[in-house]
Amino acid sequence: MSTFVVEGGHQMRGELIPQGAKNEALQILCATLLTDEVVTINNLPDILDVNNLIALLKDIGVDVARTGESSYTFQAKNINMTYLETPEFAKKMSALRGSVMTVGPLLARFGYAILPKPGGDKIGRRRLDTHFQGVMKLGATFEYHADRKLYTIKGEKLHGAYMLLDEASVTGTANILMAAVLAEGETTIYNAACEPYLQQLSKMLVAMGAKINGIGSNLLTIQGVSSLHGCEHTILPDMIEVGSFIGMAAMTGSDIVLKNVSIKDLGIIPDSFKRLGIKLEIEGDNIHVPAQDIYEIETFIDGSIMNIADAPWPGLSPDLLSVMLVVATQAKGCVLIHQKMFESRLFFVDKLIDMGAQIILCDPHRAAVIGLGRRNSLRASNMVSPDIRAGIALLLAAMSAKGTSYIHNIDQIDRGYQNIDKRLNAIGANIIRTS
C-alpha cells in the first residue's frame, strides 16, 4: 500500500492540463467491443481504472496497441468468449465497477455476457436494476448462479423496445444504449442520462454507424443496425479533475491556469465554485484561478444559508461534493452540503474534523460546514483514503494544512487521477510518494 507524504502550506503557480475524463473513458473502451474493425481512442487517461479495463479487454481477446502518449487502437476481432467462463475473468470483472458496461456490447454482438458482482468505490448502495431491466426489455434473460456469485445474460436476438428508466443512471443508460444500437427495430429510452460523457458515447456510436436521435436530451431514440464499423474518438477533459484543481487553488491561495478544459461541457461547475466565493476568470477555453487570501461563501438572495446539492446532469456531479465540502472548510461563511445520490460518501468528514474543520455531519447525506477562513487553518494528520473522491479531498486538505500529513491507500487516488503528485509538484507542491 502506497502513501503520500504531504508538506502543507505551499502556494503553487503555473499551468495544469486536465487528463482525459475517467468516466467517459470507461464507456468508450467498452464500446470498442461492438465492432471487429479498428477503433482509435485519443486522450485516454493513464489511471488504474482505465488501465485495468484495458487489461481486461486484452484478456477477452481485443488487440490493443499504444500509438501515442495517450492514444490507443483497439480491434475486437478475435474475442475469446470461453474466457468469460473462467474464475480469472470473474475476479477481474468484480474488481472494477466500470466493467459492468461490457455487458451491453457483448450481449449485442455475441448474444451472451457474464456479470459478477461489480466492485469500485464503497460509497453506498449502487444497484444495477436499471441495467438489468433495460436489457431484459430488449429481450435478454438473466440467470443467477449462487455457487459462482454471478449472472449469465443471454439474448440471441435483441429487439427494440420502449422503456422509461426508473433512474437516470449514467452507466445504465450507456449499457442499454450499446445493446440497443445492434438490436432489431426501434428502441426508445426515456429518462436517459444526458451527461456530456454519455453524449460523447452517443457521438462515437454514430461515427461507427449507429442511428441515434435525441443526443443531449433525456429521450433517446435508436434505430438498430446490423453492424458497426471502426472510428476515431477523442475523450473530453475530466470535469471532476477541473473542479478538483479549482478547489486546490482556492484552498492553498495559489495562482493556477487550467488549460483546454472544454468550458461548454462543464455545466454549472464553475458557477458552483463561485458560490463558495472562488474567483474564476474564463479566458477562451482556459480557466484562471487567481490567488485569493480569503473567499467567502455566498448566501441565498433572502440571506439564508447556501445549500449545495448533487443532481443528475445538468445538475452538479456527485463526484465533486467531497471536494466542495473540504474547500468550504477554509472559506468564510456556512454551507450545507447535501449528497443525495450516495449515502456513505460523507463519512470521510471525521478525518477533516480531526484536522480542525468545523463540520456537523447531520446524517449520511448532509453535512453543515462552518467556514472560519484562514484563522482556522487545518492541522496535519495521518489518514487513509477510503475512495477516489474522498482521497483527492483529503489530499487538498493536507496541502492546505500546517505541517506534514500522511495519506495511506493512495491507490484509490491513482484510480482516478493521473500522476497527481508529479503534476502538482511541478508547479510548487511538496508531495512525496512512498511504498
Image: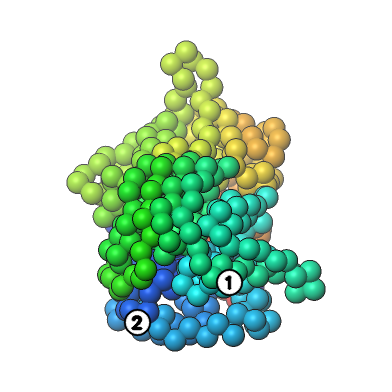
What percent of the width, then of the height, locates residue 270?
A: 36, 39
Sooner in the amino-acid sequence: mark 2 or mark 1: 2
Tell which of 237 and 242 is nearer to you. 237
Task: Determine the residue positioned at 65% across, 83% down.
Answer: 86
Please tell me how many numbered marks the rendered image carries: 2
Task: Determine the residue positioned at 48% across, 59% down.
Answer: 159
User: What residue does disc 1 label?
Assistant: 113
Q: Is residue 266 visible?
A: no
Separation of marks 2 and 1 at Cα, in angstroms: 27 Å
What percent of the width, then of the height, locates residue 47?
A: 47, 69
Tell which of 138 and 196 is nearer to you. 138
Task: Determine the residue positioned at 63% across, 63% down.
Answer: 141
Tell which of 55 and 414 is nearer to you. 55
147 on left or right of 271: right
233 on left or right of 275: left
- Per the image, label 2 sits on a secondary structure element best described as strand
Q: Quadrant of the C terminus?
A: bottom right
Q: Residue furthest top?
A: 302
Task: Determine the residue positioned at 38% across, 74% down.
Answer: 35
User: What residue does disc 2 label?
Assistant: 66
**Amino acid identity at mark 2:** Arg
